[in-house]
Amino acid sequence: MVRSGVDMIEVERIVRAILRYGDRFFERFFTEQELIDANGRATALAARFAAKEAVAKALGTGIGEVGWREIEILTGERREPQLHLHGDARRVSDALGLLHWSISLSHTHEHAVAVAVALGGQSDEDEDDA
């Protein structure tokens, strides 16, 4: 089974949210390590925000059923995005049998986009045979 999600956001939306809500915005949407990895760059935060949305879409839940901080996008040793799922997000992923995730992020000064692809679990055909 392959599941995917994609999301795009205007970087300016993140900038406005930071200016309006400050620390409350950071605490609601990002883990401490995500904030460290982003190093205050609005483009990096926007890309992570889009990635969280993309992962939630791939899970089939949207953000309503999983928390923003349960989907964590960190920076790997080679600067690649790494997905870490916690809490309900991890439970949903495990229930679906999703074994492998790939995350891709990109941004300009104006927009950030993210794609999430998950592999594993039963195909729709396998479920019909069960």
Image: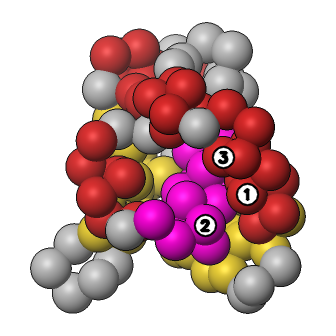
Residue 26 pos. (x, y %): 50, 38
Residue 98 pos. (x, y %): 39, 40
From the viewer's perspective, tell me whether residue 26 is left or right of residue 109.
Answer: left
Residue 101 numbered mark, or none: none
| Mark 2 residue type | Ala
| Mark 1 residue type | Val
SS at mark 3 in the image: helix
Q: Which residue, given by chain and number where applicable, does mark 1 sit on? A: 15
SS at mark 2 in the image: helix
Q: Who's the residue at 31% across and 64% down the image?
A: 37
Residue 42 numbered mark, or none: 2
* Start-end of magenta stretch: 40-53
Q: Are marks 2 and 1 in contact (CB under 8 Å)?
A: yes
Q: Earlier in the sequence, mark 3 or mark 2?
A: 3
Q: Residues within 10 Å of mark 3 (few under 14, many from 20)?
A: some
Magenta span: predominant SS is helix
Q: Which residue, given by chain and number where applicable, does mark 3 sit on? A: 18
From the viewer's perspective, tell me whether residue 21 is left or right of residue 82.
Answer: right
Residue 103 inside the magenta-drawn segment: no
Q: Are marks 3 and 2 in contact (CB under 8 Å)?
A: yes
Q: Residues within 10 Å of mark 1 (few under 14, many from 20)?
A: some
Q: CA distance from mark 2 to mark 1?
A: 6 Å
